[in-house]
Image (cartoon, grey):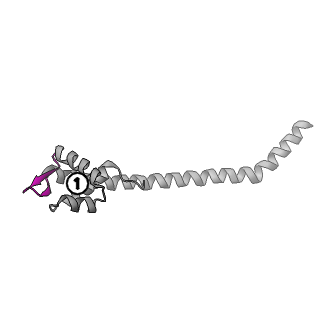
Amino acid sequence: MSKYRDRLQIIARILSVASGGAKKTRIMYQANLSYKLLCQYLDDVLDAGLVCFEKGELYVLTDKGKEFLDRHEEYSKRRKSLEQHLNNVNGEKAALEKMCLSVGKIGGNANRLSNNRELKK
């Protein structure tokens, strides 16, 4: 998995923090965002209807935001599972390639030498 968060991960984190109602500063710190990025993402999630601004100070999750979080959690689980399978497949491929290279270096050179000698005769 990448060491950087993608857009969906950042939005999910913002929604997670806002799930109990949160001010901008709390969201910024708990989602680990700069103020500038926080403002951009808050505008996006407000426009999408994932959060609403309540009582003039708190960002609160909407029903659509709750659905997003639930679906994102399922998506993350499936993605992680697929990445693990892909890593296993890549590991198996590397092992097979290593086996081919090992055989080629040990027995392949001797075979090539004897084949070359026979061709010269």
Percent x, y for residue 59? Answer: 15, 56
64 left or right of 116 in image: left
For the image, the number of numbered tags is 1
Q: Which residues fall within the magenta stretch?
A: 49-62
Q: Amino acid type of disc 1?
A: Leu
Percent x, y for residue 16? Answer: 22, 59
Percent x, y for residue 98? Answer: 64, 53
Q: Quadrant of residue 58?
A: bottom left
Quadrant in the picture for the N terminus: bottom left
- Whether 59 is among the magenta residues is yes
Please name whichever residue, 27 or 77, is drawn nearer the observer in this view of the structure: 27
Q: Residue at x 71, y 52 (%)?
A: 103
Mark 1, secondary structure of its residue: helix
Quadrant in the picture for the C terminus: top right
57 left or right of 107 in image: left
Q: Which residue extends farthest front?
A: 36
Q: Residue at x 38, y 55 (%)?
A: 81
| Residue of label 1 | 69
